[in-house]
Amino acid sequence: MMKLSSLQLCCLVLTATLLVGAAHGQSAPTFEAQIQHGQDELALGNAEDALNAGDAATRIDPERWDGYALSGRALLALKRYEAATDALSKAIERAPADQQGALRQLRRLSVLAEAGAGAGGGTAAATPAVPAPAGAAAPA
């Protein structure tokens, strides 16, 4: 019997896994599918799952704005304001002009919420609703 190195065995298992997935019609999730999944999860109140979907979309296409926007909205819902502000800033840099105003408003809300939380103020009043920018699932 032929001996395989651990690297060869790993490559063989990975190749087999990919072939089985392709044979069953499975493919890597698309950017749009990740965005839609994240928006659905956010609407259901599952901000952590929405964040995972937004981050996955960003890994698929880091030049698109809507992955960052989804992650920012999820982080805002999770009350992780500084990270939300960063993600929304990246979204603003990449977004079309007609989307930037809504994204800037979300970023302002995040900054205000962070300031309220950091000053010992009540975070319930400072926690903004997290609406989706219009056309958030549209291609860039």
Image (cartoon, helix red, strand yellow):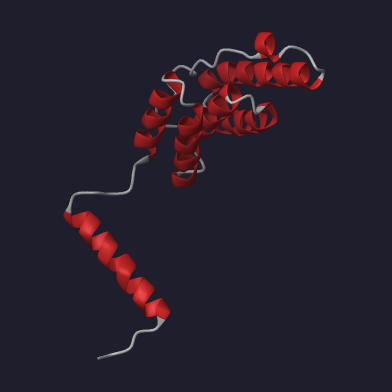
Q: Is residue 111 visible?
A: yes
Q: Residue at x 50, y 40 (%)?
A: 55
Residue at image x 48%, y 18%?
132
As drawn, which residue projects farthest toward the right?
119
In this image, 139 relative to 24: left or right? right
Residue drawn at 38 percent across, 72 percent down: 10
Image coords of residue 120 (percent x, y): 80, 17
| Quadrant containing the N terminus in the rendered view | bottom left
Tally of numbered discs: 0
Task: Work out which residue is located at the far top of the displayed protein and give it.
Answer: 125
Residue 55 versus residue 4 in the image, above or below? above
Residue 17 relative to residue 61: left or right: left
Residue 126 in the image, given as x and y percentages of width and height:
68, 12
Task: Name the one closer to the observer, 121 or 43.
Answer: 121
Q: Quadrant of residue 35?
A: top left
Quadrant, the C terminus:
top left
